[in-house]
Image (spheres, rainbow, N blue to C red):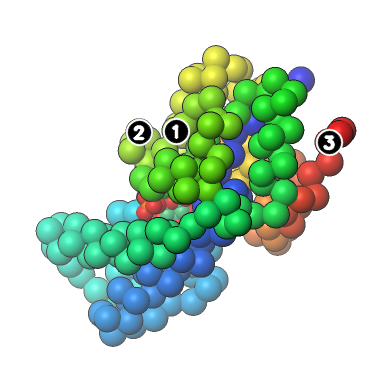
Amino acid sequence: NITACIFDLDGVLVDTAGYHYQAWRVMANDLGFDFTELQNEKLKGVSRIDSLKLILGWGNVTKSEEEMLFLAQKKNDDYLKMIEQMTPENLLPGASDLLKYLKANSYKVALGSASKNAKLILDKTGVLPLFDAIVDGNIVTSSKPDPQVFLKAAELLNEQPENCVVFEDAEAGVEAALRGKMHVIGIGDKEILGDADFVVKSLEEIEYNN
Ligand code: BG6
Ligand code: MG
C-alpha cells in the first residue's frame, strides 16, 4: 500500500545531469583530460566531493584537500550560472502533473537528493510548495547507495519504508532505495536500472487515474 513518494531531483524532476557533466568537463579539460558520458553515469547520485574524487582518479590527477575544495567550489559556481536561468519549463515531462496529482490525492511527497542546490532548483521550477519534506546534500552524511537519504525522508514523512516508492535515475539511487526496503521506479535506461521494480523512460509514462 503506497502512501508516500520520494523523488530524486537531478535526472528525475529536472534535466540537470547535462549541466553537471558540462561543468565537470570544463574542470577536467582545464586539468588536461576528458571523461566520457558512460563515466558520467557513475557520478549520478554521488555527492559533489565524491564526484570530484572519482573524476580526478580517472585523470590520474592528485590534489590536496584544499585544492579539491577550490575545484569543487569553482565547478559549483559554473553550475550555478547554468541553473540560474531555470524556470518551470525546465521540469522534465510529466513531473509537474505527477506532483500535482499526488498532492491532490493526499500522498505524502518528499525529495531525496544528494544535491546541495536542491531547494534552489525546486524554487526556480516552482514546485517547492508541493513537497512535504526535503532531504538534500546539506543533510545527508552518507551518499547513495547508502539508504540514509531515503530513510531520512520516510522518517520526516512519518511513513514506513515499505509504503514508500522512490523515483530514481541513478544506479546508486536504485540500490539505495532497495537497501532501504522501499519500492523503486527507475527513470531512464533498463540496461542501467535493471534492479528497479520497473523502469520507464520518463515520468510521463507513469499511469495513474485522473
Ligand atoms: C546529485 C547528482 O543529484 O547531486 C550528482 O546526480 C551531483 O551528479 C550531486 O554531484 C551533488 O550535487 P550538488 O548540486 O550539491 O553539486
Ligand atoms: Mg539523479
Quadrant hosting residue 143: top left
Disc 1 residue type? Val
Residue 208 coordinates in the image, percent (x, y):
83, 36
Give the residue number, with chain letter if any, for mark 1. 135
Disc 3 residue type? Tyr
Foreground mark, 2 or 3, reads 3
Query: Is the Cβ of the residue at disc 3 closer than 8 Å to that at disc 1?
Result: no
Res. 183 mark: none
Quadrant location, the C terminus: top right
Res. 208 mark: 3
What residue is rendered at 53% in x and 54% in y?
87
Q: Distance between the residues labelled 2 and 3?
A: 32 Å
Foreground mark, 3 or 1, reads 3
Residue 52 coordinates in the image, percent (x, y):
32, 62
Label 3: how many Cα within 10 Å (few below 14, some 14–19, many 20+): few
Left/right placement of residue 113 relative to residue 142 reads: right
Left/right placement of residue 115 relative to residue 65 reads: right
Quadrant hosting residue 74: bottom left
Q: Is mark 3 within 8 Å of ligand 2?
A: no
Disc 2 residue type? Ile
Query: Is the Cβ of the residue at disc 1 closer than 8 Å to that at disc 2?
Result: yes
